[in-house]
Amino acid sequence: MAASRSETELYTSDDFVESAGAVLFRVAAREILVLHSRVGEYVLAKGRRNCGESRRAAAQREVAEESGLACRLLPLDMSTRAPPPEPAPISPLDPGDHHADVSRSYAGVCEPFAMQIRRLGNSGSGGGGVKIIWWFAAAVADEDKVPTFDAMTPAERERFDAVAFVGFDEALERLTFEQDREVVRRAIALVGGTYYGK
C-alpha cells in the first residue's frame, strides 16, 4: 500500500473543532472592531461553527452574537489556491490548468483570507486535537447605524464587557495575541488593496 507523498495527519470528528471569525471593519472610517473579554483580553470576533452551518454563516453569526452588530462579508481581491468555480473561463492571471494546485489571483472573492490551526491540550478522545479557525473580512451592515455596546443586554454581550471600533494602529496595539495581530495585518492589507487603492 502506498503512503501519501505529503506529510499527513488525520483527526476524527471528536479531535477537531471548526471555528469561523471575521475582522469587522467600518470601511469608510478605517476602523476595526476589537472586543474586550471579561478575563481582560482584547480579541477578534470568532466562535465555533454549528453542525450544518456554512463557514460564512458562522462568521456572520459569531460577529452578531459577540458584538451585537450585523455584518456583511467583504469580497476581496486576493490570491488563493482554491480553483475557480465550474465552469469558468481561464483568465489572463490563471497559470493554466484550472485544476492545478497553485495560487491564483481573483478579484472580488468572498472566501476566507486566512486559516489558523491551534493545537488543543485535550480533546474528546483524551489526547491532543486541533481547532481550525477560518478568517473572513467583514463590514458593518450599516456604518451609519452602529449601536453602542452599552445598549446591549448582558445576554447579548456574550462573554465581553466592551466592544470598540478603533483605528488600524490602535487595534494592532490593543490585541492581546500576536496571532490576532497577524490576522489583522493581513486583513488590513487585503481590504486596503481592494477598497482604498493599491
Image (tube, rainbow, N blue to C red):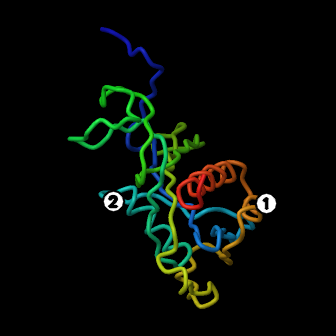
> Around disc 2, counting alpha carbons within 10 Å, would you say few (fewer than 14), some (14 to 19), or many (20 or more)?
few
Which residue is depicted at the point 52% across and 41% down?
A: 130
Q: Secondary structure at mark 1?
A: helix
Pointer 2 residue: 53
Callout 1 amino acid: Glu
| Residue 37 screen position, x and y as percent | 68, 69
> Around disc 1, counting alpha carbons within 10 Å, would you say few (fewer than 14), some (14 to 19), or many (20 or more)?
few
Q: Which mark is residue 141?
A: none
Q: Nearer the viewer, mark 1 or mark 2?
A: 1
Callout 2 amino acid: Glu
Q: In this image, 77 relative to 170: left or right?
A: left
| Residue 191 screen position, x and y as percent | 56, 57
Q: Quadrant of the N terminus?
A: top left
Seen from the viewer's position, the closer of residues 16 and 134 is 134
Asked if residue 186 is positioned above or below residue 155 in the image, the reply reads: above
Q: Which mark is residue 173?
A: 1
User: How many numbered badges does the structure rendering display?
Assistant: 2
| Residue 77 screen position, x and y as percent | 48, 50
Which residue is depicted at the point 26% across and 39% down?
A: 89
| Marked residue nearer the N-terminal end (1 or 2) | 2
Which quarter of the picture shows residue 87? top left
Which residue is depicted at the point 71% across and 63% down?
A: 168
Seen from the viewer's position, the closer of residues 126 and 128 is 128
